[in-house]
Image (cartoon, rainbow, N blue to C red):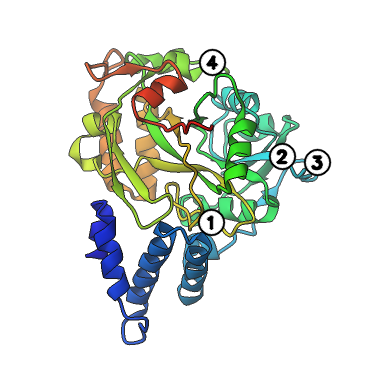
Amino acid sequence: MASLYIQCKRYDEACALIKLIPESCVFVSKDYQVDIFKLRAWHAHHMGEIEEAKDIWASISGRTFLSRIHSPYSDLKYRSKAPVHVDPDDIFLFVCVKDACIRLPWFLSYYRKIGVDKFFIIDNDSNDGTADYLLNQKDVHLFWTDEAFNKAGQGMKWINDLIEKNGKGNWCVFVDFDEFVVFPTIEDRTLSHLLRYMDRKGDEVFMALMLDMYGEHIGVEKAYKSGDDLLNMFPYFEANYDYSGSIFCPYRSYYGGFRRRVIWNRHVGTPMTKVPIIKSGRGIKYLGNHQTTPGKVSDVTGALLHFKFMGKETYEKESFRLGKMGNTQKYWFFAQRAKEYGEEHSFLCDSSIRYKSSEQLKELGLMTKPDDF
């Protein structure tokens, strides 16, 4: 019931119930004990006791095996020639890629422009020239593995391991290679401005809302050339989002947007909340693509422009990948779209909005900008 109250944003009632839970949990199962500790960690964070919330999660780690944070993936092979060198003020970016060569030029260019200093990239056994391209980038530290992505907790074992070993207390950006961070005033300022603000506030976690971007019609994907600006070709998104409470950091789960309309009710529950930036060295670990262990969440929030739904070829590749992973629900969607839609099919409708700026997203209520930012 307490978990349900949290989802419904009835936080006072959730707190009242959590306080009634007996201190001793020795007479219940291990899984139930863990659920109780997670609720207590949420309550501590809700009351502003961030370090207490972290301590409770540390006790959870001692009671049960959580594969995504307990199994460092030590078999990643380092492929770059230059040794890893870390400066205290460097901003790092961590990403897993597979057959991403055509998108990497704009990806690297975008994040270099907004202030990323070093890239830690895991190549999951690509065969399209991805590794050769990345080995020629001086600011890229390239790692390689042929382990199955889903067996590594959707890559979380790799990411947590690299952040733990190389983060050194720096700010770390974690995104997929089809995601691009946007924060308030990004047109005039770099990540350094955002992170200095977060340092002043003692923040450790930056939350972003994922915006699915799409083009005028399916066939646009074929016109894309390596290095092209994705935003020029896929400039549309939708702004109909809702959120529920969550017991996991960043304590909100957003839903909606493009996939609410196009993927129908099967994926209404797909979480659209992301945590693209954390402060390393604070005991914060990723629990998945959408959640972390406790940390102080910033009052400034952003968006992740998500270029997944590019065209028919994307749907075909994604259905094949998901089929191999055994994800039948998502496989069905991508396979059906690849089968049904011709190149001239358009997703545009009355709710389609053309992206203009971070200020536009703020006015739409999709990101927050405090007065002192």
- Check disc 2 and give the amino acid type: Asp
Mark 3 → mark 1, Cα distance in angstroms: 27 Å
Q: Quadrant of residue 11?
A: bottom left
Q: Position of residue 52 (x, y in %)?
A: 50, 66
Residue type, mark 4 in image:
Asp
Query: Which quarter shows the N terminus?
Result: bottom left
Name the residue at the left extreme.
265
Compute the Cα span from label 4 to label 2: 27 Å
- In the rendered image of this protein, does residue 329 appear above or below residue 338? below
Left or right, 300 with reference to 283: left
Q: Amino acid at mark 3?
A: Ala
Residue 161 picture location, percent across and down: 61, 56
Q: Earlier in the sequence, mark 2 or mark 1?
A: 2
Q: CA distance from mark 2 to mark 1?
A: 20 Å
- Quick one: SS at disc 4? loop
Q: Which mark is residue 285?
A: 1
- Marks 2,3: beta carbons within 8 A: no
Q: Residue furthest bottom?
A: 27
Does residue 135 sit above or below 349 in this rendering?
below
**Mark with earlier residue (4, 1):** 4
Residue visible at 38% across and 30% down in the picture: 211
Q: Residue 193 at x, y = what percent?
A: 62, 31
Q: Which mark is residue 90?
A: 2
Is residue 33 positioned above or below 285 on the image?
A: below
Which residue is label 4 attached to?
A: 228
User: Mark 4 or mark 2, which has the lower sequence index?
Assistant: 2
Q: Residue at point 36% right, 27% down?
A: 309
Q: Earlier in the sequence, mark 2 or mark 3?
A: 3
